[in-house]
Amino acid sequence: MTDATTKPTACLALADGTIFFGQGFGATGTRVAELCFNTSMTGYQEIMTDPSYAGQIVTFTFPHIGNVGVNPEDDETADPVAEGLIVKWDPTEPSNWRATETLSSWLSRRGRIGMGGIDTRRLTRAIRHQGAPHVALSHDPDGNFDIEALVAQARAFPGLVGLDLARDVTCAQSYRWDETRWAWPEGFGRLTDPRFKVVAIDYGAKRNILRSLASVGCDVTVLPATATAEDVLAQNPDGLFLSNGPGDPAATGAYAVPMIKGVLDDSRIPVFGICLGHQMLALALGAKTIKMNHGHHGANHPVKDLETGKVEITSMNHGFTVDSQTLPTGVKETHVSLFDGSNCGIRMTDRPVFSVQYHPEASPGPADSQYLFERFARAMDDTAAARAS
């Protein structure tokens, strides 16, 4: 941790001119992004590799980050997507039987900056007060920083409003997925007896979402974010899944909404969306989305299912939300955040089309929300039975 005699090797400059100094680790250089905070106690590797964090730097409110190291199995995508991370304590040597590398060396090898030794409570209060700020994070082992230039870079950052980032994180071409969820002691499994053929649109899909689909019997074909309705229907799927992802949903909706509308108009297949996929579905059904002050990021978010009265402890990562006041006739709000009442789920009243804002695959509850994947599977079963009758 930084003290009065330690020369700072990292600097965080906010667009309003506020400066934080600390100790850098991981890669060197400067990253400019939106700053958010995450309240999770574990899962920092999954968070850093979650494509939904594109264009963001993450402040962790839990002080002990890095203490279980990293390992290849916990990556949610091939490389870290978040631009950097900020923690209270410098990471220690890992103490976990699954660790294959330290957090610092992993960040360095993957080109991402870390900063420790600062008052993350103060920084979190600043985020909550002024909204997610634009920042420049710099790591220089010699401690040489051009403060004016860093502030200028932070102020020049355009922000996420109006920014389509799904194109940057989506797959380049389609692929098949059959890996199932991790289970002790075998680890990850393989789908051997598929029941459904599902098309998943990759707006920034996490691997564990695809594993969760495979675990309920889905033979998954992943298509790029820019796939058309014709591309989807050409696969003759039993269901359509809309993944999580980063950026402004209204910007991504320019090409995603016509695809979803086309599928809904030309077929009766079940549709299930998560996070950005939830927002894409809402836009396609006629609702609107809005930017939140500081968003929801963490693994301790209570959500109420309005249809059952049950409360789920969920994992969330979103800076935009569906405006429930704009939901059209025929679309019902199914879930709400118990933190602020914002929308967390919708469904069509006459068709098996539904979505949630949170991440049921992340299992913070630990399995409060797995029923959503099973609901999707039942919907495909019911649709197939109706066709056969």
Image (cartoon, helix red, strand yellow):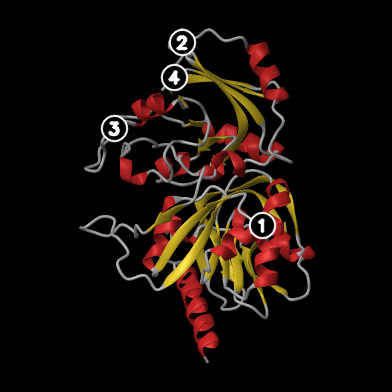
Residue 101 circle label: 3
Residue type beneath disc 3: Glu
Residue type beneath disc 1: Met
Q: Position of residue 211 (x, y in %)?
A: 39, 58
Q: What secondary structure is marked by label 1?
A: helix
Q: Given this view, does label 4 or label 1 mark the residue nearer the observer?
A: 1
Real-space Cα separation, disc 2 to disc 1, in angstroms: 47 Å
Residue 280 circle label: 1
Q: Position of residue 305 (x, y in %)?
A: 58, 72
Mark 3 burial class by Cα count in 10 Å: few <14, some 14-19, many 20+: some
Residue type beneath disc 2: Lys
Residue drawn at x 42%, y 67% as measured from the top left = 218
Q: Picture quarter containing residue 105?
A: top left
232 or 72, which lies in front? 232
Q: Given this view, does label 1 or label 3 mark the residue nearer the observer?
A: 1
Real-space Cα separation, disc 4 to disc 3, in angstroms: 24 Å
Q: Quadrant of the N terminus?
A: top left
Q: Position of residue 214 (x, y in %)?
A: 39, 63
Real-space Cα separation, disc 1 to disc 3, in angstroms: 37 Å
Mark 2 burial class by Cα count in 10 Å: few <14, some 14-19, many 20+: some
Mark 1 burial class by Cα count in 10 Å: few <14, some 14-19, many 20+: many
Instruction: Please report whichever mark, 4 or 3, sits nearer to the chain's N-terminal start.
Output: 4
